[in-house]
């Protein structure tokens, strides 16, 4: 099992991960996702940007793609790119794109940089987690995601700045995205399924939190990220813009936590436990 270095500990002990998700999905958590069991620690392999997974003669490259979350990665195999959530949600046979913006780690500039990076990969086919493969060409889909990200961010920001409370923003958002889906040819059942998979409440909460932090209302969180060494690994700090810088910062953070990472050819091996 291969996963972003930041997310690796949560697979062996998903307690915090599940608690965070339950705050979003509430009573629907179990019916939506079923039982979640810890992964055997010895089977979890932590990845940093550019690592290559060698499996049965296949070479899968891990691509750091933050924005939706800081522990987010896409995976490239030949001309196929498994994009996770950074390339949004799109149902087979429908052109409608829904951008998932849950709290707590939405970062719009980082998300846009990740979309630009996916464009640079020039993959032949995108396979989002929900629900690939994308039928249209790669660049058209990524452009649609970029535009929708700007639209939803602006929609929430305008209402938040006007002083509307969360309930009012959520109600307006849910009605608006339903109209967008209908305009893209979604029937009532598809509109409902989009809402179940990408709840409006979750999206608004994530974007309101983001705008609050930008306005200085989340200074403690922002300061922690700036001071924490992961911030440099993520590319926010000076001197951490190259792949080698990100790898070095990742290894330093692992060492500080008592873990070790060693390079083996094109791969970085991090036995986190």
Image: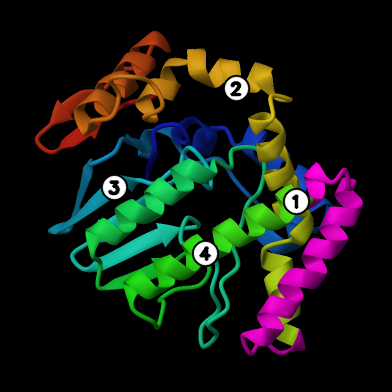
Q: Which residue is mark 4?
A: 147
- Work out whether 200 lies above or below 107: below
Q: Is residue 169 magenta?
A: yes
| Inter-mark Cα distance, 1 to 2 | 22 Å
Circle 4 or circle 2, nearest the eye: 4
Q: Secondary structure at mark 3?
A: strand
Task: Name, please, the residue furthest toward the left.
Answer: 265
Q: Which residue is mark 2?
A: 222
Q: Residues within 10 Å of mark 1 (few under 14, many from 20)?
A: few
Circle 4 or circle 1, nearest the eye: 1
- Label 3 vs 4, first from the N-terminus: 3
Q: Position of residue 210 (x, y in %)?
A: 66, 38
From which residue to which does the magenta span run?
A: 159-188
| Inter-mark Cα distance, 1 to 3 | 36 Å
Q: Measuring 50% from the left and 72% from the top, which residue is drawn there?
A: 131
Q: Position of residue 16 (x, y in %)?
A: 65, 32
Q: Which residue is mark 3?
A: 62
Q: Is residue 88 magenta?
A: no
Circle 3 or circle 2, nearest the eye: 2
Q: How many marks?
A: 4
Q: Residues within 10 Å of mark 3 (few under 14, many from 20)?
A: many
| Inter-mark Cα distance, 4 to 1 | 17 Å
- Label 4 vs 1, first from the N-terminus: 4
């Amino acid at each position: 099992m291969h996963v972003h270095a930041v997310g690796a500990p949560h697979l062996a002990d998903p307690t915090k991960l599940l608690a965070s998700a339950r705050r979003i999905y509430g009573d629907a958590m179990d019916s939506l996702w079923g039982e979640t069991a810890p992964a055997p620690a010895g089977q979890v392999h932590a990845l940093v940007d550019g690592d290559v997974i060698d499996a049965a003669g296949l070479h899968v490259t891990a691509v750091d793609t933050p924005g939706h979350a800081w522990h987010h990665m896409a995976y490239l195999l030949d001309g196929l790119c498994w994009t996770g959530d950074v390339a949004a949600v799109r149902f087979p046979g429908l052109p409608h794109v829904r951008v998932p913006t849950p709290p707590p780690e939405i970062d719009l500039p980082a998300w846009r940089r990740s979309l630009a990076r996916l464009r640079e990969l020039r993959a032949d086919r995108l396979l989002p987690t929900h629900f690939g493969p994308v039928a249209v060409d790669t660049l058209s889909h990524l452009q649609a995601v970029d535009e929708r990200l700007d639209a939803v961010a602006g929609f929430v920001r305008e209402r938040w700045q006007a002083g509307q409370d969360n309930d009012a923003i959520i109600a307006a958002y849910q009605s608006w995205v339903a109209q967008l889906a209908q305009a893209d040819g979604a029937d009532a059942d598809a509109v409902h399924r989009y809402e179940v998979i990408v709840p409006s409440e979750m999206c608004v909460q994530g974007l309101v939190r983001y705008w609050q932090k930008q306005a200085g209302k989340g200074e403690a969180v922002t300061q922690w990220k700036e001071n924490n060494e992961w911030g440099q690994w993520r590319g926010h700090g000076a001197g951490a813009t190259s792949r080698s810088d990100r790898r070095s910062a990742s290894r330093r953070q692992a060492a500080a936590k008592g873990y070790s990472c060693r390079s083996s050819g094109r791969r970085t091996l991090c036995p986190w436990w």
